[in-house]
Amino acid sequence: MIWATAEDLARNRPVVLSLYRQILRALNSPALPLGHATRLAKKAECRAIFIFGAEERSLHNIRDLLDAARHTLGLLNRGRLP
């Protein structure tokens, strides 16, 4: 199947929420050279991407979005901006 079922969405929900929180925490890190306005803009961009992803129903696209979120988190944890 290429479309997500309710069970697939329920299984991914904790992972998505965890990644979202980790990315927001990483954006608050003092290791990132961001001003206050830039930090808020990045958080808004992150929120918009996750809201867009919440409407996705294709398993392949959901997997790709999770991979992108993990990659972004890795970059942020290394002090780099995606």
Image (spheres, grey):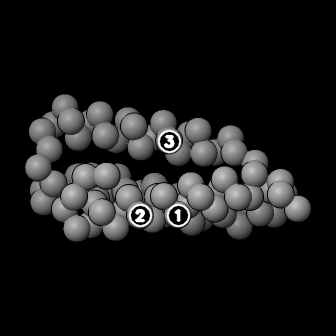
Mark 3 vs 1: CB contact within 8 A = no
- Residue that numbered label 1 is attached to: 67
One can see residue 6 in this view: no
| Residue 50, x across and y down, in percent | 53, 45
Amino acid at dot 2: His
- Residue that numbered label 2 is attached to: 71
For the residue labelled by badge 3, is the local secondary structure a helix, a strand or a loop? helix
Amino acid at dot 1: Asp
Which of the 4 quarters of the picture holds residue 42? top left
Q: Does 17 sit above or below residue 35? A: below
Q: Residue at x 48, y 58 (%)?
A: 68
- The residue nearer to you, when weighing 10 against 70, is 70
Disc 1 residue crowd, few under 14, some 14–19, many 20+, Cα 10 Å: few
Q: Say whether residue 5 is left or right of residue 11.
A: right
- Residue that numbered label 3 is attached to: 49
Amino acid at dot 3: Ile
Q: Residue at x 22, y 58 (%)?
A: 80
Mark 2 vs 1: CB contact within 8 A = yes
Q: Say whether residue 24 is left or right of residue 69.
A: left
For the residue labelled by badge 1, is the local secondary structure a helix, a strand or a loop? helix
| Residue 48, x across and y down, in percent | 48, 36
Per the rendering, the mark at residue 21 is none
For the residue labelled by badge 2, is the local secondary structure a helix, a strand or a loop? helix
Mark 2 vs 3: CB contact within 8 A = no
One can see residue 23 in this view: yes
Q: Residue at x 83, y 57 (%)?
A: 2
